[in-house]
Amino acid sequence: MKYLDSKDTIIACSSGNESNTGISIIRVSGFDFLTSLLPLFNLKSIEQRKVYFCKLVVDDFLIDEVLVTYFKGPNSYNGQDIFEISAHGNRLNVNRIINLLISKCHFRLAHPGEFTFRAYANKKLSLSQVEGLDLLINANSVFALNQGFSLMSGELKDNFDNLLKDFLNHKSSLELGFDFLEDVGEDQFNEEFKSSKAKLEITIKKLYSQVSINSNNLISPEIVLLGLPNAGKSSFFNKLLGSERAIVSDLAGTTRDFIKEFFEINNTQFSLIDTAGIRISHNKIEEEGIKRSLKLASNSFFNVLIINPFDKDLNYFESIKNLSLDLIIFSHSDLDGFAPALDACLKRLSSLFGPIGANSEAGPIGANGETGPIGANGETGPIGANSETGPIGASYIPYLIIDTLVFQSGNDSVFSDIIYSKYQNLLDFDPILIERHREIIKLLNEKYLEYDNIIENLTDLAIISSELNILGHCISELIGIVSPDDVLHNIFDNFCIGK
């Protein structure tokens, strides 16, 4: 970052400048810039935290009528003086104002994140709060939004602080053995050491449980539609979106590359991806599209396999038998002979992917979006051959039948419910989403297990202390520096030494 030590006065549109809006906020940050700035707004002075209605005039030309507010550092967002301009939000107008102020006042256009970096440098925000702000701004789900705000407001940081507290307690109990063993006695030392270690272990294990699941698709979860050419993927894709986004044709291989659009379920934004049909192809473009399809599926949150059971090329699914499938959808149920074709297809797929349909929950879907449980041929009954209704089991792949691709989309559909059920199950673990936190916590857990194993038969306190310091380095990366003064302070706060 080129601006690490920059003292420049910076300016940027802080409310986004990608489209025209009613009002946009232009923010200026630095020190000693008011002398050059205020005359442009016909202001001789300005009080902090008051809103002024002004006319922005440059060279006797009225640029805009605006509202301005001044925040005096260090009592501001980033600890510096901040001047905010609420202007009419046409992009041309916003850019004109910014360029004029850069020219007239010798400001510099801010780099991405520079305002917040100054807040971090001036200790207005911790590193975790900065990461929370990033998550908050870019969240695609209510859960990510809440976790970002939790970091911003310090709630999740409290969990990290508890980790630090437990580490300091354990470190302090060890320091007792160095400096105060004669005062407290060996029995009390051993009791304090084991007790504080057990508490630290519980805290580390709890944090580790929050990072033990894959978070790649929790922040921006992807739903990938797979299948052979002409299975109905693009038609299904269009029905879900409610628009003719993907080209639909009887010609096999129409989709050569993947198409991605957003699809919302219960205030959570998923990426719905239509992929190239899976088959053996000698066309280089189509072949590349198939490779991309399989790569997307290998990393996605939710994989949907769409199948026309009349298709004779099911052997091609050998190439994806190692992929994790979450749902199978059968199309063309309106054609004669669907039931026997479905039975034969289920047997073939079960040999590749394992049990299909058993223990799957029945739900509303059918011709023309009518509600009712699904069975073969769309008749009412449980999903799956001879299977009882119940929660979706981890070892079974549920399936649905759609009638001529008429599908009840929206939050009340079975399709949406199955997807969101998986998503909600992962959220029950209260996962930590920020990758830096996740990697450090995983390393911390690994180092704790090594520490626990090494000290089991050790009596040399110096070696134990050295091993414990490794844990301290991990915690320092997560929430800050652990200093000797912290340890000493913790000893006298928590132990009654000298009585």
Image (cartoon, rainbow, N blue to C red):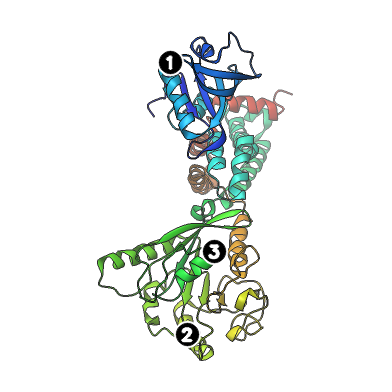
Tag 2 residue: 345
Tag 1 residue: 104
Label number found at residue 498: none
For residue 272, above or below residue 6? below
Q: Distance between the residues labelled 2 and 3?
A: 29 Å
Q: Nearer the viewer, residue 261 or 458?
A: 261
Give whichever of discs 2 and 3 has the lower sequence position.
3
Give whichever of discs 3 and 1 has the lower sequence position.
1
Mark 2 surroundings: few (<14), some (14-19) or many (≥20) residues within 10 A: some
Residue 421: x and y, percent? 62, 63
Q: In the visual, does 101 lie left or right of 25?
A: left
Q: In the visual, does 65 lie left or right of 8?
A: right
What amino acid is labelled 1 in the image?
Lys
Q: Nearer the viewer, residue 282 or 160?
A: 282
> Regarding mark 3 in the picture, which secondary structure is present there?
loop
**Which quarter of the figure has residue 383?**
bottom right
Tag 3 residue: 242
Give the residue displayed 37% in from the left and 81% down from the top.
Answer: 315
